Each structure stands twice: as structure tokens, then as C-alpha cells.
Image (cartoon, grey):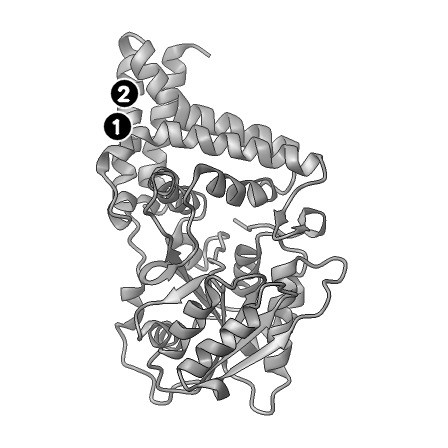
Amino acid sequence: MSAELLAVATLAIWLYLLLGRGFFWLAAERDDQLTTDAAPAAWPSVTAIVPARNEVDVVGSCIGSLLRQRYSGRFDIVLVDDESADGTATVARDAARSAKAEHRLTVLRGSTLPAGWTGKVFAMNQGFRHVEGERDPSDYVLFTDADISYDAPDAVERLVHGAEARGLALTSLMVKLRCESFAERLLVPAVVFFVDMRYPLAWGGDRRERTAAAAGGCMLVRRAALSRAGGVESIKGALIDDCALGAVMKRQGPIWLGLTERVVSLRPYPSFHDIRRMVVRSAFAELRFSPLRLLGALAGMVVTCVAPPLLAIFGSGLAQILGGAAWLLMAISFQPTLRLYRCSPLWGVALPVIAAIYTGFTIESAIQHWRGRGGAWKGRLQAAASSVGRTG
């Protein structure tokens, strides 16, 4: 391919991404949109299910934030202690005791992980089956990670309000990740940007589109709808559980995924290595463990993100102009996400470098899978069990 043809291709790709892919880059789907209708006449019951494995550093803050929610209906919490070895359950109980709300927290001791399940999903299943077995099971379940804090006291009420007003089967928030260290400022906003690019938030809520997505840190699910879909067992092998659940629930009714600043991640990623490990764990699962998909993804990333600055710097004539224009569009499209994370707009210029880093992570993820080390997380190698990925 000549430099001119490559430059035309890169510019055409970015024009399509900006204009033809749900305007994902505007980051416009926010939880503020959920509460424009009148509040429910009667608030449905909700149970938060918190799968937790060795989360002693964060689980107390998570449980405390849930117990501080000002919710007008019944709101209980079930923590599933997934064979933790660090006192996770004790810290959770202490948080409930400090809030004088021990009666609202149930701690389940997780069972040994069976074959064919991934760890988090099996813990979610145990919590869901517990809720289903209660005399008066809750109308909604809120699957939420142990490293999530509901900083705004109306966060859960806002979720339920939106779900009731819109008749949603699943309402999910892409929680705001921590963005403080240099590594986080370099790589975290791009996580959100690339996920939005792959799964435009506006398309997820559109029944005419096949795209289905959710964010695993915060997923409010209509219990009866999930039960009809076969329960959590329907995604039992999912390494990327959130969008697997999103795909299942979109077949049951409308779903919605948006951004928020009210619910935040407590998980720090102080170093480059910490973020690398997080991405490597599941990047190849995103490609359904397919070498052909891997080659296509690598080629697409090179043409879309790496080629524009190379053309702009080392090209000449038309190729240089078009490459520079594509690079400019890249930087512009990244700005709304950078504003959300309060990062300098100059990071937009570095997006090609950031994309190259994520490309390296994806290659490493495939290598780890082929070496039998895929899906490594908290002492478990889970990729072998994974049979369900994101659906789009």
C-alpha cells in the first residue's frame, strides 16, 4: 500500500469513527439522564451482591458506602466471600457494625470453584441463588465489585429510578476509575475511550443495534428478567462477565450503560505493571481467543492509530497532510474523555503511543493464553473456563 493510500485509509477511518459510530467519543451518556422522569410511586426492593476475593484493603469502604445510601425502598447487601485468605469477611462485618446496620448485611462463605465456571461469576451466582431463595426476593439485584465506592448517597436510588422509568432489564454504570499516578493518567482514560469506541454506549441501549455492553463494577439487574434468562449460570464461563451479562439481558429487554462520577473505583494502579496485568488478563478473551481476530486487531490498530503520526512526521506531500489530519482528529476525539478524568488535553497528542502500548498488552495476553497462563487473577488461571466474551 502506498503512503498516499494508507493516509486516505486512516483519515477515512477516523471520519467514520467520529461521525458514524454513535458519537461514542463525546462521552455523552451520563447517569444524570436517568432521573428526568417522575420518581416511582413505590420503590422496589434491591439487594446488592458483592463478590469478594482477598479484598481486605477496599471491601470496608465499599460496604460502608452501600450502607450510607439514601434509598427509599428496602435495600440489603449480600457479600460472597470467595475463599478469601485475608479477613475480607471480617472487615465487611466490621463496616456494617460501625454503621449499626449488621442486620442489612449477609455474608456468605463461598463454595469451592467448580469446573467450567470463572471465579467472579460463580460468586455472583451464589449471591443470586441466595436472593432467589429468600421468602420475599428482591425486585432488583445490584452486582457490584468489592473495590467500588458509591460516593453519592443517591447513587443507587438514581439507578433504580432510571430502571423503573425506562423499563430497563439492566442498568449499568462505567464507574470512574482512579487517575492519579503517572501510569494512570497515561493509560486509564484510554481504557474508557477504547471501550466506548468498541461498544458505543448509545448503541448498547438501542434495540436496533446488536451491540450489548455493561460494566462489571456496577450492574443493576431486574431479578425476574435474569431468572427467565437462565440466571447467572447462563454466563458461567465468562472471563469478561459484564458484557456477557449485557448480551443476555438485552435479549430480555432494554439495557442502558453510561458514565458516572458518583460511583468510583477504589482500586489503585500506581505503576505501569499494575495496569498491564489488568489488561493482559482479559485482552485476548476480548478477541475470543482467535489468532485471526488477533491479527485483524493488530492490523486495525496499526492503520488506525499508529500510522497517522508516522505519516505526519515522516511522510511528504498529500500523505503527510492527510496523516496529520487523522492525527488531529484522534487528539480531538480524545478530549471529552480527558476532561472527564481531568487530564491535560495534551494527552490527546500521545494517543498513538498509548494505543501502541495497548497493542503490546494484547499480544502479551495472547502469548500468556498460549502458554496456559491466560486469565491469571488472584491465584486463579481462568481463561480455560472462559467461553463467553463481550458481545458486539
Q: Amino acid at mark 1?
A: Leu
Q: Nearer the viewer, residue 335 or 146?
A: 146
Query: Left or right of 214: which side holds 264?
Result: left
Measured along the vertical axis of the image, is residue 102 above or below residue 276? Answer: below
Q: Label 1 belongs to which residue?
A: 328
Q: Amino acid at mark 2?
A: Gly
Query: In percent of the image, x 28 and y 11: which residue is there?
Result: 318
Circle 2 — which element? helix
Name the disc covering residue 49, or none. none
Badge 1: few (under 14), some or many (20 or more) residues near its Cα, within 10 Å?
some
Q: Quadrant of residue 121?
A: bottom right
Whole-percent x, y for residue 117 in the image: 70, 59
In three-dimensional space, the C-alpha distance between marks 2 and 1, rounded to whole angstroms, equals 6 Å
Q: Nearer the viewer, residue 262 or 319?
A: 262
Measured along the vertical axis of the image, is residue 318 above or below residue 390? Answer: above
Q: Nearer the viewer, residue 185 or 313?
A: 185
Query: Left or right of 279: which side holds 229?
Result: right
Whole-percent x, y for residue 148 in the image: 43, 63
Residue 286 seen: no
Whole-percent x, y for residue 11 in the image: 33, 25
Query: In percent of the image, x 41 and y 86: which residue is there?
Result: 100
Labels 2 & 1 near each other (Cβ < 8 A): yes
Query: In percent of the image, x 25 and y 40: which residue is there?
Result: 335
Q: Label 2 belongs to which residue?
A: 324
